[in-house]
Amino acid sequence: DSGVTQTPKHLITATGQRVTLRCSPRSGDLSVYWYQQSLDQGLQFLIQYYNGEERAKGNILERFSAQQFPDLHSELNLSSLELGDSALYFCASSPWDSANTGELFFGEGSRLTVL
Amino acid sequence: AQKITQTQPGMFVQEKEAVTLDCTYDTSDQSYGLFWYKQPSSGEMIFLIYQGSYDEQNATEGRYSLNFQKARKSTNLVISASQLGDSAMYFCAMREYDNQFYFGTGTSLTVIP
């Protein structure tokens, strides 16, 4: 158990709909990252937050948005869903200045299926 | 340019044999970290091993070890005594100084009985 919690684990919805994926980072981790992994693909970086502020943005579509709340949990909002948005969405957390290795701790992912 | 390159989409290894998964990286930072993650068919991402850019010794973690060649910017993962449970996708990743993480496209490893 990495300590990162993602909900829901599975989600099936229709094209055009909107969904929200939720992530609770490890206790004490201030950084949250979102990644998208489509079928048989690598991890595509979407966005990173640190202590409530957006820190870096990757290949995130305009239909997607995210935020990190004061309690450090984060939400990824996906709207006007298309078939191609079907993927495994990972949340990961990391301490900003790790005394150790500073690796990313991944949640189990939220598997989104758009029909 | 790609930050992380894994040139082996798929690899096969006989059970109990050793296998090397290749990874090269590109960075201008002096301080960075290199990671390997395993993703079994169940989907979760499992951290395996870490190498810091200033570490002079190759990292080892059980059956996992890294062949870190800083001048060549490569960090190859060696899995010794392969087991059937090692069949999975393996991702190489790099953390740069600003805490940005970059992942390779992964190598699918199949262990043959």
Image (cartoon, coloured by chain):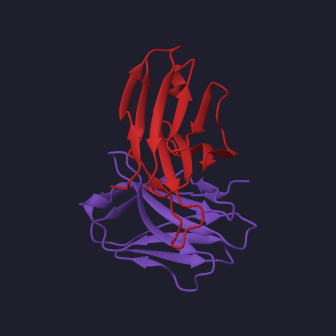
Residue B36, given in percent of the width and then of the height, sits at: 48, 63
Instruction: Tell me the quadrant of the picture where the C terminus of chain B can be found.
Output: bottom left
Please tell me which residue is depicted at 61% across the width and 46% down the height of the picture.
A49
- Where A4 falls versus A39 (above or below)? below
Q: Which chain is red?
A: A
Q: Give the quarter of the image for residue B43.
A: top left
User: Does residue B54 show up?
Assistant: yes
Which residue sits furthest left? B113
User: Does residue B112 show up?
Assistant: no
Q: In front here: A52 or A21?
A: A52
Q: Which chain is purple?
A: B
Residue B107, given in percent of the width and then of the height, sits at: 47, 55
Instruction: Tell me the quadrant of the picture where the N terminus of chain B can be found.
Output: bottom right
- Where A32 falls versus B50 (above or below)? above
Please tell me which residue is depicted at 60% across the width and 56% down the height of the picture.
B101
Q: Give the quarter of the image for residue B23.
A: bottom right
In the picture, measured across the screen, residue B36 lies left or right of residue B2, that is: left
Please tell me which residue is depicted at 51% across the width and 81% down the height of the picture.
B58
Please tell me which residue is depicted at 36% across the width and 35% down the height of the picture.
A9
Which residue sits furthest bottom? B56
Which residue sits furthest right? B28
In the picture, measured across the screen, residue A112 lies left or right of residue B41, that is: right
- Where A34 falls versus B58 (above or below)? above
- Where B33 falls versus A93 (above or below)? below
Residue B102, given in percent of the width and then of the height, sits at: 61, 55
Q: In front here: B12 or A84?
A: A84
Residue B110, given in percent of the width and then of the height, sits at: 35, 56
Q: Give the quarter of the image for residue A52.
A: top right
Total marks in image: 0
